Image: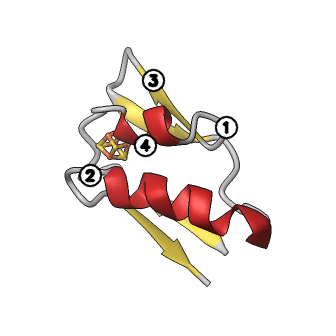
Amino acid sequence: MKIVADLEKCEGLGMCEAMANDYFEVDEDEDQVNVLDDSPPEEDRAHVYAAVQACPVLALSLTD
Ligand code: SF4
């Protein structure tokens, strides 16, 4: 599983960080997300997926 962030779409709204701050951090200077670990273990899939789904501009996706 890999987290993919489309930084062209990201507006730094921080929903992903609010849902999973162990994987996402918003850079407040750039208003863009940093993915702290883009290869989560399988056991974290539901946790990461919830954060991906929370992005209002659909900037995040998960690949297998
Ligand atoms: S929720 Fe979406 S727009 Fe907001 S920081 Fe995360 S990736 Fe960017």
Q: Nearer the viewer, residue 5 or 21?
A: 21
Q: Cα distance, mark 4 to mark 3?
A: 12 Å
- The image quadrant where one finds ligand 1 is top left
* Position of residue 35 measured from the top left corner of the image (x, y, whole percent): 57, 45
Disc 4 marks a residue whose amino acid type is Cys
Label 4 vs 3, first from the N-terminus: 4
Residue bearing the label numbered 4? 16
Q: Mark 4 near ligand 1 (CB under 8 Å)?
A: yes
Q: Cα distance, mark 2 to mark 1?
A: 22 Å
How crowded pointer 3 is (Cα within 10 Å; few <14, some 14-19, many 20+) is rated as few
Label 2 vs 1, first from the N-terminus: 2
Q: Cα distance, mark 2 to mark 3?
A: 15 Å
**Residue at 56% from the left image edge and 41% from the top image edge:** 20
How crowded pointer 4 is (Cα within 10 Å; few <14, some 14-19, many 20+) is rated as many
Q: Nearer the viewer, residue 15 or 4?
A: 15
Q: Cα distance, mark 2 to mark 4?
A: 16 Å
Disc 2 marks a residue whose amino acid type is Glu
Model colouring: secondary structure
Label 2 vs 4, first from the N-terminus: 2
Residue bearing the label numbered 1? 22
Residue bearing the label numbered 2? 8
**Residue at 62% from the left image edge and 84% from the top image edge:** 64
Split into 4 quadrants, where in the image is the N terminus?
Answer: bottom right
Q: Is residue 20 left or right of residue 18?
A: right
- Is mark 1 in CB contact (under 8 Å) with mark 4? no
